[in-house]
Amino acid sequence: MKFGLFGTATIAAIGLAMPAMAQTPIKIGFISTFSGPQAAIGEDMRRSVELAKEHLGGKMGGRPFEIIYEDDQFKPDVGKQKSEKLVQQDKVNVVTGYIWSNVLLASLKTVTEEGDTILISANAGPSQIAGELCNKNFFSTSWQNDQTPMAMGQYLQEKGVKSLYLMAGNYAAGKDMLAGVKRTFKGEIKGEDLTKWPDQLDFSAELAKIRAAKPDGIFIFYPGAHGVQFLTQYVQAGLKSQIPFYQVFSIDAITLPQQKELALGTLGAQEWVNDLPNEQNKRYVADFKKKHGVYPSYYGAQSYDSIMLIASAAEALKGDLSNKDKVRAEMKKANFKSLRGDFKYNTNQFPIQNFYIQEAVKDADGMMTVKTIATAVKDGKDPYYEKCPMK
Amino acid sequence: MDYLLLQMLNGVQLGLLMFLLAAGLTLTFGIMDLVNLAHGSLYMMGAYFAWTLIGWTDSFVLGALLALPATFLLGIVVEAVVARRLYARDHLDQVLATFGLILFFNELVRVLWGAAGKSIAVPAFLNRTVEILPGVPYPAYRFAIIVVGGAVALLLAWLVARTRIGMLIRAGASNRRMIGALGVNIELLFTLVFGLGAVFAGLAGLMAAPITSVKIGMGDDILILAFVIIVIGGIGSIKGAFVAAMVVGQIDIVGRAFLPDLLKTFLSTSAASSAAPAISQILVYIVMAAVLVWRPTGLFGQRA
């Protein structure tokens, strides 16, 4: 029986080499956080990747494709191990995902250099990778960390906000975020705290400092579960009515179901918002909402885009991803319908794109969401691309 | 001045939470001579029980009150099934077995409640600020933690100092064999103490939940601090645990509130901010080391 099957397979392989190649699936590895308090972000990304798969009819350039999901458990060392497994053992064509800058930095070499495999970050954008560590195998469908806070800082500068108090988690992205806002916001910085990441969830001491510092506004970066805790404690301390709350990545479709009305009226910056008026975005948001009953987040949108980017290269190369130079050349064109609208790649393979200011509001059905209220930056480039040796 | 007061209150609030956790730990360690690493799991289970029961009853207070007997029962089951078999063993066996319990409870939570964390909302009547002094607002929920934690500490002090059970507990902490020889039902006492410790841990867990969210392994980090507290305070001493918890609470807040600014005068912001929490944590261990040099049995320790 076994022999029979084997024989059939051999004949099929020899006799029908071309169609057989077309039938071996393209493999995509997807690293995200699927357990622990930050699992909601990974789930949003997974749902969006599955939706992209559905929209593509399960095929890229005529070949079926499969996604192998791996859980980084919110830990850089685990993320690196899982990346290694995807590249060495599963031999995937592309690795994508990565919420966290510290996880991405730990995994970068394993994928792009030791594995010579293409990596698309669907979220994290540490400054190092935009600058000196830039790599021909690295693409981003998100942003460089500094950019989003730069957009927020610019908006606050133009609005005439006099002083800010800055807070973020003490890790790669947190440092980039505070550096970013200080690039464009030129008013007084009344205080700055980098808190222990990710252990610290109680901000009582810092909140008392903010109260004493009396800034015109507070700017924070606390993604996911941390954002929920921070905003809750900020409101409990009675500070929201006194000091306006500005944020990046801390009030979004992931956190709003828990922050609810506490978030109303707060402003943030983002490169993608659920109400951006292009056709592909309308379809994505509507289908996502119909399926899951909640809004997708930028984490999801960027993950969807990463799959579409791979698909664009696979279409152009008729499903043959064996020549990596050609794949990279196709990806660099960014020739796909991004949910944020069209963008071009910079020399360091980060997008050149717009950033919008968004406000937390209730939609017509009473569900919390964010809506675009202004364009803060047009065709923004990250501040590190000139340090990247690639031209 | 207001600022100082606020930060001190923050320290007291943190200290009281840690005292609740440390109280059970110091009792089981002092009386049963049991190193119970799984004490943090009871803290976590208290929070998860509260999350479920608050969902059922639609009331924070009711859910929290029901979670306490639930944690008590869980503590008694753990004592009867696992802990009881460990009293006669040496500490290494106890560490291994109770570490196994941590893994068991973390996995159990994953199966029952899922991998994602849960959040408990602050009850509406506490979701505001109270003026502790005119013009000095403080979050009402944190104030409630101080009130409840303080009341429980008083209750415990009364229980240990004035009741028959307390007398047995104190006797057990200083000489376990002797009270057995005097005909006290030691098994029942042990079960009761373990259950009591579980209730306090569960109470700490559910009170911390609205601030830090309910998640797998939430008790594991704070457990280490609880061990430091019972070592500083003296194993088996409730009074010691209380004093040490207050000290550790203040040290933690000082480290976060004042050290960064102090360090920023001669370091970069980023270096200062990453150094401050680390130094603050080392501070706790420095205090522990100093206390142990000065008094090897801890501040209020009964025996070496």
Image: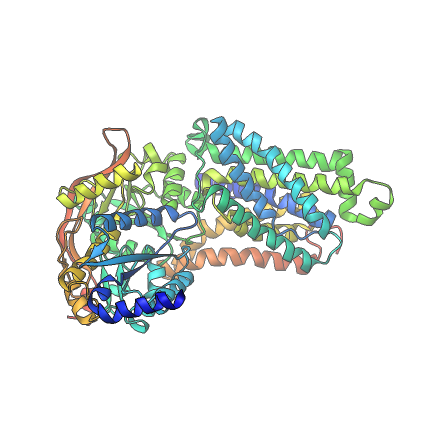
Q: Residue at x 32, y 38 (%)?
A: A256
Task: Point out the image quarter for the C terminus of chain A.
Answer: bottom left
Horizontal arrangement in the rendering, residue A107 relative to residue B236 (left or right)? left
Residue A230 to residue B232: above or below: above
Q: Residue at x 26, y 38 (%)?
A: A289
Give the x, y percent position of residue B61. 52, 28
Front residue of this view, candidates B55 and A290: A290
Front residue of this view, candidates B301 and B58: B58
Residue B18 to residue A330: above or below: above
Give the x, y percent position of residue B242. 63, 43
Give the x, y percent position of residue A307. 23, 55
Front residue of this view, candidates A161 and A247: A247
The image quadrant of residue A310 is bottom left
Residue B51 to residue B110: above or below: above
Q: Give the residue at the far right of this rendering.
A: B182
The image quadrant of residue A13 is bottom left
Residue B294 visible in the shown view = no
Give the x, y percent position of residue B254. 49, 50
The image quadrant of residue A365 is top left
Q: Residue at x 45, y 47 (%)?
A: B115
